[in-house]
Image (cartoon, grey):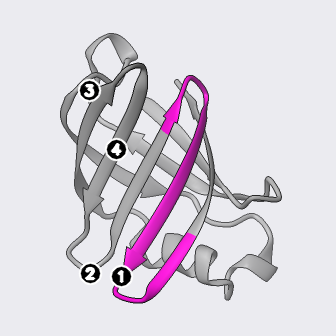
Amino acid sequence: MTAIQLLTDANEPLGFLLFANPAGGQLVAGEYGCILASFPVSVTLWDDPRGRFILDHKQREFRAVVTSDAGEITIRIDMDTGWSLELKGKGDGMRWVAQRGAERVAGKAIAGR
């Protein structure tokens, strides 16, 4: 299972995006089942919009579409709550943005296995 840790820009842990069955443990272009797992470690983030996004979507299954262009990976998840989650980056360093209408939350992400 491949995991991407979602963080605030101040490196505060928010949770993990976990992918089922990536080929050889690597995300390549295609579709994957995934879930948001865990929750913000700091209780001060539970009412923060970024933490609330994780808490509202944790332990629910979603479909992720992964594309790659010139070494940059893009992961897009359209959620049944009206939110979309997009992650972009090269190597271990990524950025994430979740958006629903005018609502927007964002942060950093670290890819791992």
Residue in the image at 46% along x and 86% along y: 103
Judging depth in this view, the residue of 34 and 82 nearest the camera is 82
Q: Does residue 79 belong to the magenta stretch?
A: no
Mark in the foreground, 1 or 2? 1
Pointer 1 with pointer 2, Cβ within 8 A? yes
| Residue under pointer 3 | 21
Q: Please state the horizontal and vertical placement of residue 53, each as a whole percent of the image.
A: 50, 76
| Residue under pointer 2 | 81
What are the residue bounds of the magenta stretch?
89-105
Give the alpha-carbon distance from disc 1 to disc 3, as whole Å: 28 Å
| Residue under pointer 1 | 100
Helix, strand or loop at mark 3: loop
Helix, strand or loop at mark 4: strand
Which of the two discs, 2 and 4, labels the residue nearer the N terminus? Answer: 4
Pointer 1 with pointer 3, Cβ within 8 A? no
Give the alpha-carbon distance from disc 2 to disc 4, as whole Å: 18 Å
Give the alpha-carbon distance from disc 1 to disc 4, as whole Å: 17 Å
Q: Please state the horizontal and vertical placement of residue 106, each as a whole percent of the image.
A: 58, 65
| Residue under pointer 4 | 75
Q: Which label belongs to residue 39? A: none
Pointer 1 with pointer 4, Cβ within 8 A? no
Say whether residue 1 is visible. Answer: no
Pointer 2 with pointer 4, Cβ within 8 A? no
Q: Quadrant of residue 21?
A: top left
Q: Is residue 36 left or right of residue 80?
A: right
Residue in the image at 43% along x and 57% along y: 36
